[in-house]
Image (tube, helix red, strand yellow):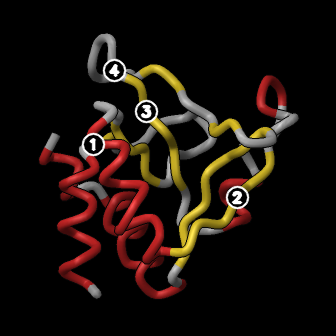
Amino acid sequence: MSEAQHDPKYQQFVEAAKTNGVVYALAEGEDLLVVESVEYEETDVIPFWSSEADAKAHCSDEWASYQPEAIPLDVFCDGWLKEMYDDGLLIGTNWDSELSGPEVEPTVLLAALRLVQ
C-alpha cells in the first residue's frame, strides 16, 4: 500500500488537507459512504476528498442522497484515523469521477499528515 504515497492524487490530498485544515467525506444522515476496496479483498474503504467541490461532484446517481461532510483535520487525525485503523478500514484519497485513486492505510496517512503539520 506504500505505492500510494507516490501517487499525485495522494500527495495533493495530503498537501491540501494540511493547507485547508479540513477533509470531506460523503454522509447520508449519520452514515458515511463506505465502499469495497478495488485492490484488497474483503476490505472496505471510506473515500475522502481535500475539497468540498470534489466531494460534492460524487453526490449523484446512487450517491445522490449523500452530502459532503467537513471534518476538521485535527479531529480526523486524532480520532477518525485511529478508529478506522482499529476497524481495518482503508482511506480513499481524492478519488476521481471513475472512483479511481489511492487506497491507503490510516496509519500511513496519519504519518504523512503529521509530517506536514
Q: Nearer the viewer, mark 1 or mark 3?
A: 1
Is 23 located above or below residue 95 in the figure? below
Mark carried by residue 45: 3
Q: What element carries label 4?
A: loop
Return the x and y of residue 82 as percentages of the image width and height.
30, 53
Of the numbered discs 2 and 1, the one sitting upstream in the chain is 2
Give the class, few, some or many, for how many residues have Cα within 10 Å of label 1's Cα (few <14, many ≥20): some
- How far apart are the two marked residues, 3 and 2, measured between alpha carbons? 16 Å
Q: Mark 4 points at which residue?
A: 43
> As rendered, which of 15 and 35 lies closer to the eye?
35
- How far apart are the two marked residues, 1 and 4, measured between alpha carbons? 12 Å
- How far apart are the two marked residues, 4 and 2, measured between alpha carbons? 23 Å
> Given the image, on which type of amino acid does mark 3 rest?
Val
Q: Nearer the viewer, mark 1 or mark 4?
A: 1
Return the x and y of residue 17 as percentages of the image width and height.
46, 75
Of the numbered discs 1 and 3, the one sitting upstream in the chain is 3
Q: What element carries label 1?
A: helix
Q: In the image, 84: left or right of 55? A: left
Q: Residue at x 72, y 44 (%)?
A: 27
Q: Residue at x 63, y 39 (%)?
A: 32
Mark carried by residue 69: 2
Q: Which residue is drawn at 83% across and 27% down?
A: 61
Is 80 located above or below residue 38 in the figure? below
> Given the image, on which type of amino acid does mark 4 rest?
Thr
